[in-house]
């Protein structure tokens, strides 16, 4: 079977606290690991997407509405639904690791790096689908 869950692939979480949220796969583990003996992936996603901005909003209001709230998580493949979209993850790939997920302070640092990278992508106007709320 072809491996279609690769780093940079956008997926949707279908189970758990973040069900219905879009994520990008940072590191896939097809065979599992010793601590997690099932196929899984380390993902970074958007917990709260940026809101719509119009031209008559002030600079302060615009800055607040364009904020992104990210999350980083280890997710079982059974709980992911891959999409046709992909996203570049090189800017935060080194920060989001298995070790970073174990330690709470490192997890917070990883979230900050992901937040910065995703907000830059949103400001640049790239990957618009990833930053829109999922309607279903």
Image (cartoon, helix red, strand yellow):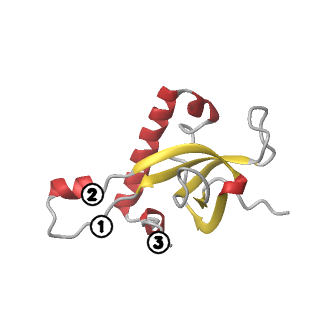
Of tags 3 and 2, which is closer to the observer? 3
Kindly indicate whether the residue at mark 3 contacts the one at mark 1 (C-beta within 8 angstroms).
Answer: no
Q: Position of residue 95 (x, y in %)?
A: 53, 37
Badge 2 is on which residue? 65
Under circle 3, the secondary element is loop
**Residue density around tag 1, few if under 14, some if 14–19, many if 20 or more, within 10 Å:** few
Horizontal side, residue 109 vs residue 34: left or right: left
Which residue corresponds to mark 3? 135
Q: Which of marks 1 and 3 is in front?
A: 3
Q: Can residue 28 be seen in this view?
A: no
Residue linked to disc 1? 52
Most distant residue in the bottom direction:
136
- What residue is rendered at 64% in x and 53% in y? 7
Using the image as rendered, state which of residue 88 and residue 133 is in the foreground.
133
The tag earlier along the polypeptide, 1 or 2, is 1
The Cα–Cα distance between marks 3 and 2, rounded to whole angstroms, is 19 Å
Please say if the residues under marks 1 and 2 sit with CB atoms less than 8 Å apart. Answer: yes
Front residue (pair 58, 14): 14
Measure the C-alpha gap from mark 1 to mark 3.
15 Å
The N terminus lies in which quarter of the figure?
A: bottom right
Residue at mark 1 to residue at mark 2: CA–CA distance: 7 Å
Q: Judge left or right: residue 57 versus residue 127.
A: left
């Amino acid at each position: 079977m072809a491996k279609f869950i690769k780093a940079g692939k956008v997926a949707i979480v279908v189970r758990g606290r973040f069900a219905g949220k879009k994520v990008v796969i940072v590191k896939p583990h097809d065979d599992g690991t010793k601590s997690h003996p099932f196929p899984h992936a380390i993902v970074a996603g958007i917990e709260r997407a940026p809101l719509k901005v119009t031209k008559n909003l002030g600079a302060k209001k615009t800055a607040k509405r364009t904020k992104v709230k990210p999350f980083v998580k280890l997710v079982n493949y059974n709980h992911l639904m891959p999409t046709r979209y992909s996203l570049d993850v090189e800017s935060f790939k080194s920060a989001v690791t298995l070790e970073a997920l174990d330690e709470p302070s490192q997890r917070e640092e990883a979230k900050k790096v992901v937040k910065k990278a995703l907000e830059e992508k949103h400001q640049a106007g790239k990957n618009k689908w990833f930053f829109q709320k999922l309607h279903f």
